Amino acid sequence: MNLQAILDDIVATLRPELGRSGKVADYIPALARVPADQFGIALRTADGQEVASGDSATPFSIQSVSKLFSLTLGVRALDEKLWERIGREPSGNPFNSLVQLEREQGVPRNPFINAGAIAVADRLLSVGDGLDDLLAFLRSLTGETITVDEEVAASEAATGFRNVALANFMKSFGKIDNDIPAVLDVYFRQCAIRMDCRQLARAAAFLCRDGVHPLQRTEVLGVRQARRINALMLTCGTYDAAGEFAFRIGLPCKSGVGGAIVAVVPDELTVCVWSPALDATGNSVLGMRALELFVARTGMSVF
Ligand code: GLN
């Protein structure tokens, strides 16, 4: 299969659509300034071949895609114990919703909604160095320098009132151990990490390799743990659009409001698409279209 031709064709097909539909996330002021007319795609095969097209080397704010890597660190450090504080069910609600938390006693539905990722950040602070561990992990996975966009982090910290509410609400149920400002600092800064499509496809590669590190023979996760992360991506990785993603794409995916979506084809490859304009559920409009085209042209699906 000529993967380069497939990616180039997806870029050519979608380029005329750039800027036509969706809206760049504007509830985080620093993200509202990102030009919408950008599109990149990159993949890495299980045996290490890397293929890219479009704006695949343009860095962006990874936002909620960071939740994939913080969860991986949490599972590595705590394994089953992580699930004492976090559920594994799709929420069926927007990623920043507060409603279920009250009824469910401060236990977030899953680690990919904001409340769940804030709870994971709390756990990471209890077992290690929080953000420093996450950055070191991403550097190891990519073999490259990975940094935080401090302007985006400050912008989120200044306007993230819902996240402050979610953290305090969980704390009121005794479900957060560390100080709220410290936990939110990890969360806001992990969302503000800057990476490009190429780096994200590489960093996520352990998920298509039964947990084996992309660049080394070491284990990032055990086989069962890696499969479970893929299961969570399929059921919860794209918030209240997870059903639609499973229906239209049929791959485990994790999205972020920076416009990136990482998808896993188990045993085959990982792919990252990025285009900043989002639909109402916070998922990249052209990213989703690109993944549909990719699946149609390669026949790859978990179903
Ligand atoms: N930083 C964003 C927030 O907390 C992340 C949301 C997302 O990417 N879905 O709202």
Image: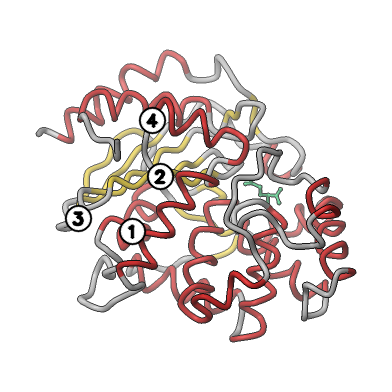
Disc 3 designates what residue? 46
The tag earlier along the polypeptide, 4 or 3, is: 3
Query: Which amino acid is tagged 3?
Result: Ala
Please give the name of the residue rendered at 76% of the width and 67% of the height, measured from the top-left corner. 184
Q: How far apart are marks 2 and 1 (CA)?
A: 10 Å
Q: Distance between the residues labelled 4 and 1?
A: 17 Å
Q: Residues within 10 Å of mark 2 (few under 14, many from 20)?
A: many
Helix, strand or loop at label 3? It is loop
Q: Are marks 3 and 1 in contact (CB under 8 Å)?
A: no
The tag earlier along the polypeptide, 4 or 1, is: 1
Q: Does the residue labelled 3 lie within 8 Å of ligand 1?
A: no
Q: Do the residues labelled 4 and 1 touch (CB within 8 Å)?
A: no
Helix, strand or loop at label 4? It is loop
Q: Is residue 297 left or right of residue 133?
A: left
Q: Where is residue 137 in the image (x, y as percent from the top left)?
A: 44, 73
Q: Are marks 2 and 1 in contact (CB under 8 Å)?
A: yes
Disc 1 designates what residue? 207
Would you place residue 9 above or below residue 203 in this image?
Answer: above
Q: How crowded is mark 4: few (under 14 residues within 10 Å), some or many (20 or more)?
A: many
Instruction: Point out the frontmost of discs 2 and 3.
Output: 2
The tag earlier along the polypeptide, 2 or 3, is: 3
The tag earlier along the polypeptide, 2 or 1, is: 1
Judged from this view, the residue extending furthest toward the left is 1
Please give the name of the residue rendered at 49% of the width and 42% of the height, measured from the top-left corner. 260
Disc 2 designates what residue? 252
Q: In which quarter of the image is residue 54?
A: top left
Q: Where is residue 55 in the image (x, y as percent from the top left)?
A: 39, 37
Q: Position of residue 18 (x, y in %)?
A: 48, 20
Q: How far apart are marks 4 and 2 (CA)?
A: 9 Å
**Depth check: 41 or 227 in front?**
227
Res. 249 mark: 4
